[in-house]
Image (cartoon, helix red, strand yellow):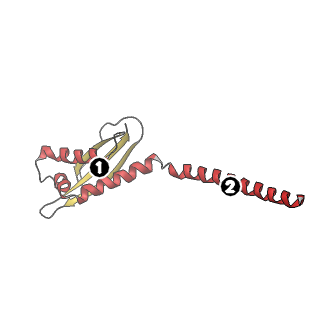
Amino acid sequence: MVKNKRAWLRIMEAVIGIMIITSVLVLLYAQKTGDKKTGEYIYDLQSKVLIDIGTNPDLRDAVLGTVQEDLNYTIVNDSIDESLPDNLGFKLKICNIGTPCPSGVYPNGDVYVEERVISSNLEIYAPKLVRLFIWEA
């Protein structure tokens, strides 16, 4: 009878030990995969913003210059500002294809750049290069 109790205790000790080890491993794995790298996060965000610019007719017209020239950047910048978190700064450059597009001055640190070509809408063909610079503010 005493031997039988010891066997159950050893089995329970082993089960509890395995549960502790697996819970520690699960917690470590969750922390590692939960922290998405900042660069990957920003590039994903930039890609979504540029896709939105390309698919939204109002933003597309603003990039192509079919609305008033002084409103072009304002319309697109406001849209980008709404879709980015407050801890990120950004700058937008819209240039003609084939012409130099100066990058400007940006803060020290990591600046992430993504670009997309917006070529036309149903009425106008005037390809533009849209560059989006994002950094941590």
- Quadrant of the image occupied by residue 9: bottom right
Which residue does the image show at 30% across and 48% down from the upper left?
83
Q: Give the CA separation, mark 2 to mark 1.
A: 51 Å
Q: Earlier in the sequence, mark 2 or mark 1?
A: 2
Which residue does the image show at 77% across and 54% down from the upper left?
13
Comparing marks 2 and 1, which lies closer to the viewer? Answer: 2
Q: Identify the disc placed on residue 19.
A: 2
Most extreme residue toward the front is 1
Q: Is residue 23 left or right of residue 109?
A: right
Q: What crowding class fits label 1: few (fewer than 14 Cα within 10 Å), some (14-19), or many (20 or more)?
A: many
Q: Work out which quarter of the rendered image holds the N terminus and state it.
A: bottom right
Q: Is residue 57 left or right of residue 31?
A: left
> Where is residue 131 shown, x and y percent of the image?
29, 49
| Residue type marked 1 | Arg
Q: Nearer the viewer, residue 53 or 12?
A: 12
| Up-down relation of residue 121 to residue 134 (above or below) | below
Q: Work out which quarter of the rendered image holds the C terminus and state it.
A: top left
Most extreme residue toward the bottom is 122
Which residue does the image show at 12% across and 46% down from the upper left?
69
> Where is residue 44 shown, x and y percent of the image?
39, 53
Q: Is residue 41 left or right of residue 49?
A: right
- Quadrant of the image occupied by residue 126: bottom left
Q: Identify the disc placed on residue 131.
A: 1
Q: Secondary structure at mark 1?
A: strand
